[in-house]
Amino acid sequence: MTTPHFRAGVILVVRRADGQVLSFERSDKPGNWQLPQGGLDGEETPVIAAWRELREETGLSSEQVRLTGEYQGWTVYEFPDEVREAGRIDGRLGQAHRWFFFDVLDDRVEPTPDGREFVAWRWTDVDTLIAEVADFRRPGYLEVLT
């Protein structure tokens, strides 16, 4: 019997020198912006997953960014009913994330959205990002970014 659980993952905060963060618009929810994120694969460590997800979802690598920190706790959210009912989450209750902070080496860097999960990108201030992220994700953003 399968039991519901929380998927472990990472959230990536990519910053410019002016403090703005890189956000992406979701392909399935126009107007919903968020930080890149993704799950851990197999026995992957969170830091390895962070670099993989960074490359997969933004096209950025160690040539454009440097890892500058990690939030020491995990943030957890439960999926709202409409997400669970959509059937895309394999019976999971929600997600638990480690957060990683990256600084760009050149403020003119341009990421490449993956085209599947994200269709657009922009630099934004933290307050705007928090206001535009999906409600169920907002508590973690507030905890880590403010």
Image (tube, grey):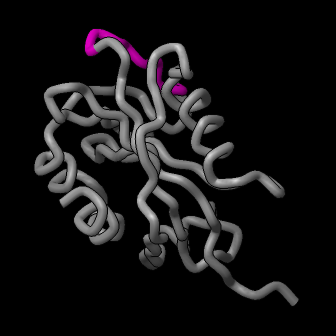
In the picture, the quarter occupied by the N terminus is: bottom right
Residue located at (22% from left, 28% from top):
123
Q: Is residue 106 above or below residue 141?
A: above
Taken as a whole, is the magenta stretch helix, strand or loop? loop
Q: Residue furthest front?
A: 68
Q: Is residue 21 left or right of residue 2?
A: left
Q: Is residue 128 left or right of residue 110?
A: left
> Which residue is nearer to you in this view: 29 or 36?
36
The quadrant holding residue 75 is bottom left
In the picture, the quarter occupied by the C terminus is: bottom left
The quadrant holding residue 50 is top right
Residue located at (82% from left, 85% from top):
2
> Which residue is nearer to you in this view: 15 or 26?
15
Residue located at (29% from left, 47% from top):
32
> Which residue is nearer to you in this view: 130 or 88?
130
Q: Does the magenta segment cover residue 19? A: no
Residues shaded magenta: 107-114
